[in-house]
Image (cartoon, grey):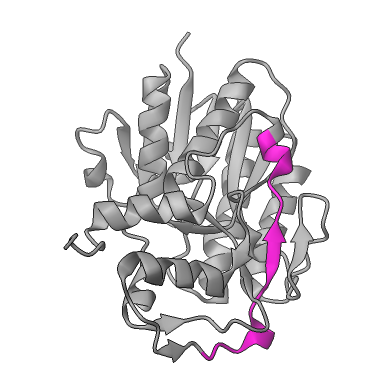
Amino acid sequence: MKKTTLILGCGDIGMVLGRELLAAGHRVIGARRSAKALEGSGIEPLPLDLNDEGALAALPDADYVVYILSADRFDEAAYRAAYLDGLKAVLQVYEGRDQAPKRLFFVSSTSVYGQKEGERVDEETPAESAGFAGALMREAEQALWASPLPGTTVRFSGIYGPGRDRLIRQVLEGRIAPETPPMYSNRIHRDDCAGVLAHLIGLEAQGESLEELYLASDCAPEPLHEVMAWLAGQLKVEPTEVIQAPLRKRSSKRCDNTRLRETGYVFRYPSYREGYAQVMKEGGFLPEPV
């Protein structure tokens, strides 16, 4: 029997994931407010806004549900609606179904961590962010784990990729992070986000047991200064302005992806060097060779 995967919030990552699952033989349903972007992708479009009355009743049965909704804006009400309230409502629907999903995957964020001194963090590290975004993500994670449905949370670090090139543009403007104190940053390429989710779904489909939590970040947590200096070298740009970020408000941690790698996942872009090289090449950012 062909497995059915429902992707709630089938945007950039969801579409890449959907294509991978289709190639693996899944039936894929993509739910998003405007389903027009899914035309011709092979992903079955489901126009859906979870805030609309009656939307939840339209949720189809599925073997696997992947929850990748994004908040409309960066404020507490939007985060509560997208992550905590939305996930709780979806869980309630599927908990009442005769045919419950085999597993629900919730895409969370490493913003749940509050570390600021470059500490190493993994799945066992207390997640005690003082900000509303991290705190609400943490509440949503706990709602999933409290549900009778099998659930796995995947915490992504800073996502970059085609169209997610803010750091490249900052470097092109001559900006660079301060060298001291070192401000550690963590990232994961969009294609690895999709790859991680497809990998975990594949393990579940094969009957492998999954953990409730995986930290998904690449293999090179580095000071942001070093990342931007490397980008400047590739782009042939001389930094002229140090970003005066309020360091006391910024997180600085080093994400450890050991648990994920021990499942057999191999990163397509193990560090920012491979990943940003792909983004710069695809985006036409690299200077022409002389």
Q: Above or below — where is 110 with respect to 244? A: above
Identify the residue at horizontal 49%, vertical 36% (top origin).
195
Q: Which portion, as a residue range, is magenta?
A: 244-261
- Asked whether 228 or 137 is in front, the reply is 228
Identify the residue at horizontal 19%, vertical 60% (top origin).
289
Residue 125 appears at what percent x and percent y? Answer: 82, 57
Residue 78 appears in the figure:
yes
Q: Residue extending furthest front?
A: 290
Q: Residue extending furthest top?
A: 1
The quadrant the C terminus occupies is: bottom left
Residue 47 appears at what percent x and percent y? Answer: 31, 44
Q: Above or below — where is 133 with respect to 288? A: below
Q: Above or below — where is 198 with respect to 84? A: above
Residue 204 location, quadrant = top right
Q: Above or below — where is 120 with respect to 11? A: below
Identify the residue at horizontal 34%, vertical 54% (top origin).
279
Q: Is residue 30 magenta?
A: no
- Asked whether 163 or 226 is in front, the reply is 226
Residue 83 location, quadrant = bottom right
Residue 131 appears at what percent x and percent y? Answer: 67, 76
Q: Seen in the image, is 126 located left or right of residue 93? A: right
Total number of numbered discs in the rendering: 0
